[in-house]
Amino acid sequence: MDDLFISEFSATKALKRPLFTAQKSPIVEKLRVWAYRGFISGSVKREFQAKYRHSLLGAVWTVLNPLALIVVYTVIFSQVMRTRLPGAESSFAYSIYLCAGILTWGLFSEITLRAQTVFLDNANLLKKVSFPRFCLPIIVILNASVNFAIIFALFTLFLLISGNFPGWLYFAIFPLLLLQIMFSIGIGMILGVVNVFFRDVGQFFGILIQFWFWFTPIVYSPTILPEEVRGFIAYNPMAALIGAYQRILVNQQAPDWLALLPLTLGAIALCLLGLQLFRKRVGEIVDEL
């Protein structure tokens, strides 16, 4: 992304600006980010296009990949293995349960894993061009959101065709997505800053997130677990969030918003901590790179 940007963003003009500036107020930072909205949208567009630039089908793969995923889950688990959820009557219940968990987990995983390396991946850009550094986490969020929107739109179409669309409850997904993005980018920004100075952090989190996936009820129902294990999983913040998605899409019930209060407070705290750490260390990050 950085080489493309340097060639297209008028690097000569950008280099006339100071590479390092005094720490500005949050309002000034927001105004600067808004002024660079063309850079942000252009970066998202270029990365999306670069993904399929040399393929024959091009952007068609954006639809085919998630469509294949949904078909596999539906055919294998619902029709071949005849997997059933306890208390669910629909033959597609387990497929919907699985997709609701895996697709939303994919958004969390993509944001956190990409954010933790965002400064390392854009080292040349950070050294050569002056721009609001906060643009980079925003680009991570937008890129992940575009990928998620495509696959979740196809999943929504499947819900409509199969007669499992939850109606107006569907719109309860959007505040959950906002909460998930806040939680994800909060973790990602903290890891991204720390990973610049201690590279083992990124390697460790890559392993941790694999255990975290299986510690979250995505491919299994928490009702099959022993009582003491269920109590332990209750401390997993992603379990409550994934469970809220599954409750909407499988059971067609409103989420337990009160149960999401600890996650909401944690997401806000992580975002504030990540932002403060980022603003405090942004100059050191460039030096370290």
Image: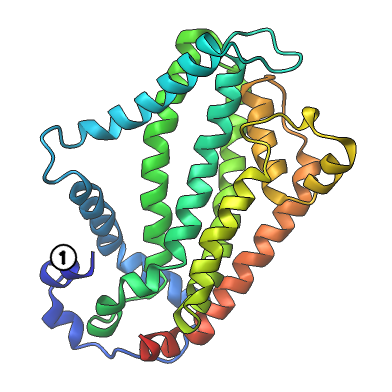
Could you say which is closer to the camera, residue 33 or residue 193?
193
Q: Is residue 182 among what the camera can see?
A: no
For disc 1, the marked residue is 4
In the drawing, does residue 71 fall left or right of residue 181? left
Please name the residue shown 24% across and 33% down the image. 61
Q: Residues within 10 Å of mark 1 (few under 14, many from 20)?
A: few
Secondary structure under tag 1 reads helix
Q: Amino acid at mark 1?
A: Leu
Q: Position of residue 218 (x, y in %)?
A: 63, 35
Please name the residue shown 47% across and 77% down the image. 199
Q: Position of residue 88 (x, y in %)?
A: 70, 13
63 over 93 or under it: above or below: below
181 over 150 or under it: above or below: below
Q: Is residue 227 among what the camera can see?
A: yes
Please name the residue shown 49% across and 69% down the image. 202
**Which part of the image, by quadrant, shows the N terminus?**
bottom left
Could you say which is closer to the camera, residue 49 or residue 228?
228
Q: Quadrant of residue 16?
A: bottom left
227 over 170 or under it: above or below: below
117 over 140 or under it: above or below: below
Q: Position of residue 52 (x, y in %)?
A: 19, 43
Q: How many marks?
A: 1
In the drawing, does residue 161 fall left or right of residue 201? left
**Which part of the image, by quadrant, shows the C terminus?**
bottom left
Q: Position of residue 224 (x, y in %)?
A: 78, 28
